[in-house]
C-alpha cells in the first residue's frame, strides 16, 4: 500500500492524521449509538414576513445532544452520517419528528397557517422506498395539505436521478432550493422542476451590507422567482439595515438571527402564543 503511494510510507504514521482518524471513528461509533438512543432534537427557526412581521412557518434544524460533548451542530455530524448511510434512519426520524410537531402546532394554532421546512440530504434520495416513507409519515401525522416543504441544495438536484421530484406535487409537498446561487442550477432545472421556493444564501444577504449599492444579484433572483411563480426567502438576516434593503427590493420572506435563532420546541411554542396573541388584537 505504502509503495503504491511512491514509497512515502511515513505519511501513514503522521500522528495528527492518526488522531484525526481515531476521532472520526469514535464519532461514527457514537453516531450509531445516538440513533438507537435518540440523542437528537430539532430546533425550529421562524420564517417571517418582511412586510407584516407575521410568521409563515419554521425550518427544522437538527442538533445532537452528545452525552459527553454537549450540543453538536449539524455541520459536524451530517457529513459523517452521509458517508456512513446513517443519514437514512436519522433523516426518517427528523422528518417524522418535524411532521408530528407541525401537526401539533396546526391543531393548537388553527388561526396561523403554519408551514414546516425540512432539510434533506442527497443521500436520502437514493433510497428506493423514500417516496413511500414520506407518504406514510404524512398519513400518520395528518398535517394540512401544502404546508410541508423539503429543502435541498442545487447540488442535490444534480446528484439525484432516482427520485422523481414531480411526485411530490401529487402528495402536496413543496420543494425548496436551499443556499440558492452557491451551487449549479440551470434555468432549465428551475423551469422544469416543481420548485415553489428559493432561499437566497446568507452570503448574498451579508454582501448587501458591505456593498449596499450592489443589490443586482438579489434583484435578479427576485425577478426570476416572480416570473417562475416561486417564493423567495432571504436567509441569515442579522440586522435592521438588511431588513430595510430587502424590503426595498421587494423581498417578502426572511429568516435569521435578527428575528430569532433556531428555537427548541417549548420556546417555539411560546413564540407562536405571542404571535397569535398579537393577531387577535388587530
Ligand atoms: P441550512 O439548511 O442552510 O440552515 C441554515 C443555517 O444557518 C442553520 O445552521 C441556522 O442556524 C443558521 N442561521 C440561521 N440564521 C442565521 C443568521 O442570521 N446568521 C448566521 N450566521 N447563521 C444563521 P445549522 O442549524 O447549524 O445548520 C447548518 C446546516 O446543516 C444547514 O444549513 C443544513 O444544510 C444542515 N442541516 C441542519 N439540519 C439538518 C437536517 O435536519 N437534515 C439535513 N440533511 N441537514 C441539516
Ligand atoms: Mg435549510
Ligand atoms: Mg441555507
Ligand atoms: Mg446550508
Image (spheres, grey):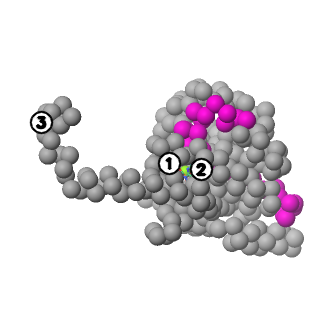
Q: Residue shown at 80%/60% (left/top)?
A: 104
The reply to whether the magenta stretch includes residue 14 is no
Separation of residues labelled 1 and 3 (CA atoms): 33 Å
| Mark 1 lies on residue | 81
Left or right: where does residue 231 sit relative to residue 279?
A: left
Answer whether labels 1 and 3 touch (C-beta < 8 Å).
no
Q: Is residue 218 in view from this perspective?
A: no
Q: Where does residue 198 sit, x and y in percent of width and height?
A: 62, 43
In the foreground, 256 or 94:
94
Q: Secondary structure at mark 3?
A: loop
| Residues in magenta, as a range | 106-132
Indicate which disc residue 7 carries. 3
Which residue corresponds to mark 2? 90
| Residue lying at 81% horizontally and 48% vertically, measured from the top left | 140
Find the distance from the CA under tag 2 to the CA under tag 3: 41 Å
Q: Is mark 2 within 8 Å of ligand 1?
A: yes
Above or below, 212 relative to 164: below
Amino acid at each position: 500500500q505504502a509503495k503504491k503511494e511512491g514509497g512515502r510510507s511515513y505519511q501513514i504514521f503522521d500522528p495528527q492524521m492518526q488522531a484525526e482518524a481515531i476521532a472520526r471513528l469514535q464519532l461514527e461509533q457514537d453516531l450509531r449509538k445516538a440513533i438507537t438512543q435518540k440523542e437528537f432534537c430539532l430546533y425550529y427557526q421562524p420564517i417571517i414576513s418582511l412586510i407584516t412581521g407575521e410568521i409563515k412557518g419554521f425550518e427544522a434544524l437538527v442538533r445532537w445532544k452528545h452525552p459527553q460533548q454537549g450540543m453538536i451542530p449539524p455541520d459536524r455530524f451530517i457529513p459523517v452520517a452521509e458517508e456512513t448511510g446513517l443519514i437514512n434512519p436519522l433523516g426518517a426520524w427528523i422528518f417524522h419528528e418535524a411532521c408530528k410537531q407541525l401537526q401539533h402546532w396546526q391543531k393548537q394554532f388553527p388561526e396561523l397557517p403554519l408551514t414546516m421546512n425540512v432539510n434533506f440530504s442527497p443521500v436520502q434520495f437514493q433510497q428506493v422506498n423514500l417516496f413511500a416513507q414520506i407518504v406514510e409519515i404524512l398519513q400518520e401525522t395528518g398535517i394540512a395539505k401544502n404546508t410541508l416543504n423539503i429543502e435541498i441544495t442545487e447540488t442535490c438536484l444534480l446528484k439525484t436521478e432516482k427520485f422523481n421530484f414531480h411526485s411530490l406535487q401529487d402528495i402536496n409537498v413543496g420543494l425548496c432550493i436551499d443556499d440558492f446561487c452557491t451551487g449549479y442550477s440551470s434555468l432549465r432545472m428551475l423551469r422544469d422542476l416543481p420548485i415553489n421556493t428559493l432561499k437566497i444564501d446568507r452570503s448574498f444577504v451579508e454582501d448587501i451590507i458591505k456593498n449596499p449599492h450592489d443589490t443586482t444579484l438579489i434583484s435578479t433572483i427576485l425577478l426570476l422567482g416572480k416570473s417562475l411563480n416561486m417564493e423567495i426567502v432571504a436567509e441569515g438576516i442579522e440586522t435592521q439595515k438588511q431588513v430595510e434593503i430587502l424590503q426595498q427590493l421587494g423581498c417578502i420572506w426572511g429568516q435569521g438571527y435578527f428575528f430569532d435563532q433556531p428555537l427548541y420546541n417549548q420556546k417555539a411554542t411560546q413564540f407562536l402564543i405571542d404571535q397569535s396573541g398579537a393577531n387577535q388584537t388587530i
